Image (tube, rainbow, N blue to C red):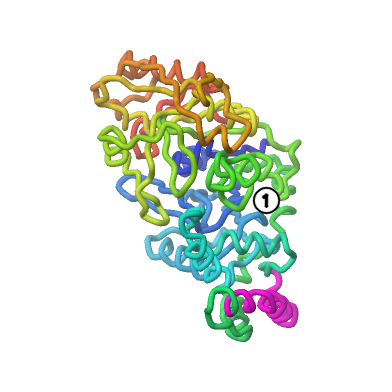
Amino acid sequence: MPAVVIVGAQWGDEGKGKATDLLGSRVDYVVKFNGGNNAGHTVVIGDEKYALHLLPSGILTPGCVPVIGNGVVIDLDVLFQEIDGLNARGIDTSRLLVSANAHIIADYNRTLDKVNERFLGSRKIGTTGRGIGPTYADKMNRLGIRVQDLFDEKILRAKVEAALDLKNQILTKVYNRRAVAAEEIVESLLGHVERLRPFVADTALVLHDALREDKTVLLEAGQATLLDVDHGTYPFVTSSSATTGGACTGSGIAPTEITRVIGIVKAYATRVGEGPFPTELFDADGDRLRENGGEFGTTTGRPRRCGWYDAPAARYASRINGVTDFVMTKLDVLTGFEQIPVCVAYDVDGERVDEMPMTQTGFHHAKPIYEYFPGWSEDISGARELSDLPANAQSYVREIEAISGSRISAVGVGPDREETVVLHDLL
């Protein structure tokens, strides 16, 4: 049976949680393979809204096994707060599996993240200050603390002390902050051991065996393609691999197991933090998209930057990820606009460019070249077939499909899991 990847095809917040939840009852495992609690999914089920940060969306689907893969960095305080919050609402979290190879966010990583951003000033990246980047840096510098280390106090203590040898020099001599005591960190982490133990597994082996047993595995990305550390709008990116390639390294599933890649796009575009955004709006239309779309961060509450749909960016995401199907979300947010601009190319220093520019400078200078599509005023939340949509909304979907590099297989027409027009089966 297949391994299916869901990735964001823009700058994040496209509605991956809804897409994952839409498929959740048809899959056996849902795997979070990158990122940490620096991003979130909002899933609406009936009258209930769930904001998930570290936990995979599959946690909300009875019978589905949610997995936190080795590519994730974990804040244990946040993990257990989230578990407690779901348990209080009657959600069973006992099926959760956590990779023994996932890395832990220590308190000193959060501290360094915040002081680094303040130090950068106008050159800041726009991180969430949750210690994600410093934890991934520790991983690459071989100074990281993994989940499995918590079960060997001697190894844990040695790793914390090694990490603090350098970090305390930076904190005290560069940032004029107090040194962090290794014992404080060790004791804090050891306090989670017994509660964490039942969840920990060799998740790569579990997923391998599941696929051999004809189970279906869904891998969901945090963040999105244009925030990927290799393929995004560097340096204004996240610290992990948020593309299909990251799904393999972050879960332990082989590339040959992946049979379908589902890219999620909004019917418009948003991003948070710093960095270039060619179609960004600074007018009443941008405010309208933000208010109608509820464009405020699930994790941070920050207002999102809003703009029109960017087709070259979608084509880029399609080829980087090998997208087989797009799911378009939030088409309903465009209801009421008399005309809807769509970016079909860029003007870069007077020259038309039909694909994303190769360089950071080129993309920074890119100005959108728009085509304009007629809007609609009818309520579309009740549509379940493409033919239920107003003619102009149908045309918008088909025109976007034609210029985005892959077919559109589902369209979100409202926040609820049922408010979806399905054009093609996603499994």
Vertical placement of 277 versus 349: above or below? Answer: below
Label 1 belongs to which residue? 250
Q: In this rendering, would 248 be left or right of 187?
A: right
Q: Residue 396: x and y, percent?
A: 39, 18
Specify the quadrant that holds the N terminus: top right
- Residue located 42% across and 56% down the image: 299
> Badge 1 local density, few (<14 within 10 Å), some, or many (20+)?
many
SS class, disc 1: loop
Vertical placement of 310 versus 275: above or below? Answer: above
Observer-nearest of 307 and 267: 307
Q: Residue 82: x and y, percent?
A: 45, 63
**Is-magenta flag for residue 188?**
no
Observer-nearest of 112 and 41: 112
Residue type at mark 1?
Gly
Q: Residue 182: x and y, percent?
A: 63, 83
**Is-magenta flag for residue 156?**
yes
Vertical placement of 356 versus 158: above or below? Answer: above
- Residue located 74% across and 82% down the image: 154
Q: In this rendering, would 34 be left or right of 297?
A: right
Which quarter of the picture shows residue 26?
top right
Count numbered badges in the picture.
1
Observer-nearest of 316 and 194: 316
- Residue located 37% across and 38% down the image: 306
Q: In this rendering, would 336 be left or right of 275?
A: left
Q: Is residue 52 visible?
A: yes
Q: Residue 391: x and y, percent?
A: 32, 13
- Residue located 57% across and 36% down the image: 361
Specify the principal SS of the magenta part. helix
Q: Is residue 151 visible?
A: no
Q: In this rendering, would 374 be left or right of 193?
A: left
User: Which segment did they paint magenta?
Assistant: 148-172
Vertical placement of 5 versus 135: above or below? Answer: above
